[in-house]
Image (spheres, rainbow, N blue to C red):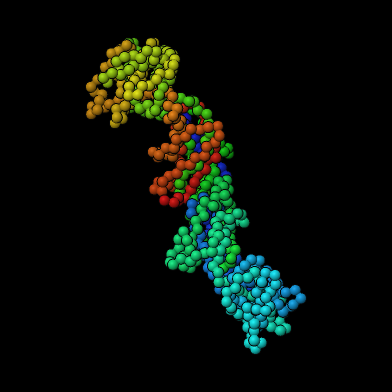
Amino acid sequence: MAINITQATGIVQWELSHEATSGLVGLNNQHIHEIAPPILTGLRPISLADGTKHVSVKLLVKANAIIDKLDLILSANRADSIKAKQVADVRVAEGDNESIIIDFGMMLTVNSVSIATGYSISTIYPWLGTKFDKSDPLFEGDGVLTHNSVSFSDVKTQRLMLTLGSGQNAAEVIDFINLSLPDLPSGLTLCLNGDQPIWQHDPMVQLGISEDITDDGWNSLGQRRVSLASSVAQYTQDPTKSDDVELEFVLSAVVPGALNIEIESVETRHIHRMYFNNKSDLTLLFEREAEQQLVIFPPSNVTEPISGIELSISGELDALRAIPAIAKKPNEITELSLGNGRAACVRLDANFGLVELAALRFPFIAGPSGAEARVILWRESDGMPMEAITNAISEPINWTGSDEQWIRFDFKEPVALEENVNIWAAINVNRGEVIWKMATANERNEYPVRIGSPGGPWRALPAIFGSGRSLGSIAGRVHMLGNADQTKPIPPLLISLDDDETQLTLTPANENSRIGLEFNAQTSKPETDSIALRIVSRSQGSIKISEVDVITGEKLS
């Protein structure tokens, strides 16, 4: 891990790497359908079976796949010819080697029976609930013609008995009996990898009038679309693995028919676990409000663009919130020298919801012998700091050092901030000299500065500083530390990717919070580029970053 710490700006950079080498990540759309058993030599059905009670399809994906889209086309229509053994218990009748029992185990509608060429059907009897009705057969041959395919009026029954021609062996025919089931399928379920159903359709299929395939009903061919992306997440999305995972979808029907499954479309991304020198977590310490960056380098074998990241955050941060959290950079042109009777004050603008001010922090450089200073709050009147606020005086602070330091000035008690009343903060230097570097003002001219003696009055800066002037308008650099309205809390963390202006706000707790950040479809990062995760804290304390995952692949628009 490479660490680059720049104390002057408060920005800390951490680098993450992908430690484990994993296989290439990709999607293999392999469709595997059921194959009918081979037909024995010398025997063949009258017609090829087109119906079934179960049908399946398999899809091969990676264990770390995020499946954004998975659409199947289900087909469920009448079965003109279905193998009896697929829908019933088919057996030789006890004590009668020329008769076959077809036991559905439920009420099914049948209107046709066919057997292998070379064999004949003599009679077909329906089940009456306690016995076969031999007094009123569904079919009875004339003893002259050979009947190996018989049609009759629709009958709903639990069982059929087939009697073959004289001397024919029923055991040789069992595997080659086909039925016609005129009812449309019902009691449809779709299961994944043998688990509980992920989709169900209990009533009988109702055919539509159009051949268009939709996801809200069946078309005229008995087809519909089913979207299942959310149903497969439990089998994939493992960021620590990239081996193959087989997904098997099985469509079943209580009332069987002509069933089929096709995979219409699949769209995936992939997720990769990142590590901090072989560790899965990193603690970030914020000694004050500041920004830190996690520089993330994607795995070297990834060939997909980066679409975002996911990570877990927990932590403990101080209740005080700093506004702003990140200091404006000095303009490197203007600085004020304070001390020896020279003072300055700055208007505290843009407090963004603070109702109490507990402290102020300024970026000061002390003179060679160090310095002592304190801050006094003033109330504005007619656009000018006019009146010092009673008891709004900080403790004096002593410090040394020739580098710029963010010095914190605490008030004895938090100062209430009145709505629509502007407050100014005056810096009084009691000992030594203090350098305060200025920033360029924004378009709203926030944090304006005035100068004067420690007790005022406060006058504007020379005319050379101003809008349209050679040095331009300047602004004081200051952080306000205070408490927000409890009914309108200010989240302490602001998190974003690279320079994206979209920021996610978060209040971390002791328990992990899982968050995700994504680039939009137009700004996905190339797979060779690193990512800078920007974490800005408005409070001091620490947070723990763990389970950082890079997401690769084009995401749905």
Residue occupying the far bottom of the picture: 144
Residue in front for this viewpoint, 207 or 11: 207
Residue 516 appears left or right of 106? left
Can you tell which quarter of the image residue 328 is in? top left
Residue in front for this viewpoint, 48 or 325: 48
**Residue 95's x, y, as percent?**
76, 76
Residue at 67 percent across and 79 percent down: it is 135
**Residue 38's x, y, as percent?**
63, 73
> Is residue 107 among what the camera can see?
yes
Residue 183 appears left or right of 414? right
**Residue 450's x, y, as percent?**
29, 19
Q: Is residue 192 above or below residue 500?
A: below
Numbered marks: total: 0
Residue 398 appears left or right of 79? left
Residue occupying the far front of the picture: 135
Residue in front for this viewpoint, 378 or 375: 378
> Is residue 337 among what the camera can see?
no
Residue at 65 percent across and 78 percent down: it is 136
